[in-house]
Amino acid sequence: MISLFLSIVNRGFFIIYNSGLLSGVSFSDLAGCFLHGLELDASIAGYIAAVPALLCIVASWLRTSSSSAWKVAFEVYFMITTTIVAVVQTADIGMFGDWLCRIDSQIYIYTLKEMLASVSIANGIAGAAYAIITIAAGTWLYRKAVRRWFIPSLEDEKGPRSSSAASTVMLLTCGVLFLFIRGGVTTATANVSKAYFSNNLLLNQVAVNPVFSLMESTFERNEKELDNYDYYTTDEAERIFAEALKAETDTTAAGGETWLKTQRPDIVLVVMEGMGRTMTDIYEGTEPVAPEINRLKKEGIWFDKIYASSFRTDRGNLAIFSGFPGQPNMSLMKYPNKTAKLPGLAGTLRDEGYITRFTYGGDANFTNTRAYVFSNGFEELVDEKSLDLDGHRSKWGYADDIVLDYAADAFVSRVRETDQPVFDAILTLSSHEPFEVPYNRLESPLLNAFAFTDEAIGRFVEKLRATEEWENMLIVLIPDHSTPHPVSIGNNSPERHHIPMLWLGGAVKEDMTVSEYMAQTDLAATLLGQLGIPHDQFIFSRDISSPETSKFGYWTFKNGFGMIDEDGVTIYDCSTESLIKSVGDSDLSRHDKGKAILQKTFIEIRSI
């Protein structure tokens, strides 16, 4: 089958293109990717071939004396399906380095403009060429095989062949195709997890067919995604969840140490695109990528053991502003009616008298951000459509240096113009692929882009420090997620999700390092606790300053979760229902706690 052949060849090109991610992988492991991927490759081939097979049955009974009409019909169908397959495969190859999972329905939360903004011109040309070559190769094979030999076989020299004979052959063919589509005769039908064969999740992802992944997530999972991960009865899940969090009993005030001089500082929160610890701690040769953050972490409050909730901005924003965990199989941002019912950090502060605003140098329609920003409680949204700034603009929008410079001035102006406290949030974008920035300090485009954002943040902080308003100011620096660099770090590992968080400004009582394990979702309760503001609506968020709360990091990855605490780490793969790693589990294991948190996440999603 042509589709099966193209899937196998595409996997080879996929491996070549992403060879940097697969360094150290043995030949036998790569061969395993091809072997275990065959079932899903065959399933997609069956889906594509099913329509022509059924048309052949119809053709045999119409008793036509010419196959020209069927040739046209088949060729149109084949061109459409081949084009779709080629486009999906090409997009998947290009996006994998950032997502570290095969393409799925989450692509629908991105507009065409946003996806193209992630692609450099060179990669765009290469991708288009690859898609065209795939379509051309598939068309050539079709014309050499199917059109030349198969369709004429419906006739013989004396006219149409026996309708019953042709139908019998095609019905048998349809039966074989049904087995391909179903994935065999066992009780388990074809699904993405059937390609999983290794405890190296990267190899499992290579084995997955991207067209199957997209199709399954679009037509099946969308109906079922909210019903996944029910490991316990609801009561049992609630009990384990409550035990896992051990939240402070009094959520109306700071439950522990007081870290701030005032309970109503002016707050500016900067969400740093992709700026994980692998970026802030790394060097290119002898050059640090993020010297400014490393300089600033020696003052203020440095949170040393905080872990990002997930691996994409849409999940990271929900973790930061709603204290809501990431989801391993979906993006809640696809459901604006549900995100509108989540608790909002901005809304809580607004109710306490704060003036709120969100600034983003790009298009705020990105992954339904506009809807979420307003539902979270921000009263004003500033994005590239309302900005008129001089300076560099990438495909994503205005560069971080000019946006942060603008945001600093705007923040100070608002503080000076009102007697109310001010809460501003800023989302950076320059450290997003394709990493095109007006800066040339480091050789690697990726590292250079992060160095650019780091320098812009340093200037932003110093500009605010030079104002009189600094003394009542709290600056919070936190990433939305980490970045898959270096490529040797697995997408499920704690290193991949380890992020920095830093509180700066004159409102900070003293310089200190918080060494407690915590999750990105804990920012909301911790900040509100320091402000003496109730935060019981943020049920997944814990005030880390309180001695009553349990201290751990929690994250989700593609169909799995991880937890880390002072005793060890647990990583669980929901697809294979197996522990990838478990070190130092307690009586109520992190395995149980993680499952309960994951189940509770979806209990809440279903209820809103």
Image: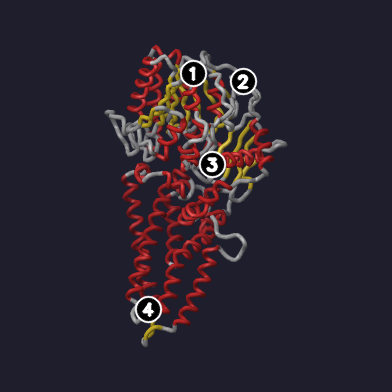
The residue wearing badge 4 is: 152
Q: Which mark is residue 299?
A: 1
Q: Is residue 184 visible?
A: yes
Cβ atoms under marks 2 and 1 closer than 8 Å: no
Q: Earlier in the sequence, mark 2 or mark 3?
A: 2
Instruction: From this view, report whether residue 278 is shown above or below residue 252.
Output: below
Q: Earlier in the sequence, mark 2 or mark 4?
A: 4
Q: Which mark is residue 255?
A: 2
Q: In this image, 490 relative to 16: left or right?
A: right
The residue wearing badge 3 is: 327
Q: Quadrant of residue 448?
A: top left
Q: In this image, 108 relative to 207: left or right?
A: left
Point out residue 167 in the picture as x, y percentages from the top left corner.
Answer: 47, 78
Residue lying at 50% horizontally and 39% vertically, measured from the top left: 338
Camera-side residue of 555 and 285 = 555
Q: In this image, 393 relative to 211: left or right?
A: left
Determine the CA span between mark 2 and mark 4: 80 Å
Cβ atoms under marks 1 and 3 closer than 8 Å: no
Point out residue 299 in the picture as x, y percentages from the top left corner.
Answer: 49, 18
Count of all numbered marks drawn on residues in the image: 4
Cβ atoms under marks 2 and 4 closer than 8 Å: no
Determine the CA span between mark 1 and mark 4: 79 Å
Residue lying at 47% horizontally and 82% vertically, measured from the top left: 165
Which amino acid does the dot numbered 2 rest on? Answer: Gly
Q: Earlier in the sequence, mark 1 or mark 3?
A: 1
Which amino acid does the dot numbered 4 rest on? Answer: Pro
Point out residue 96 in the picture as x, y percentages from the top left corner.
Answer: 45, 47
Q: Earlier in the sequence, mark 3 or mark 4?
A: 4
Camera-side residue of 92 and 354 = 354
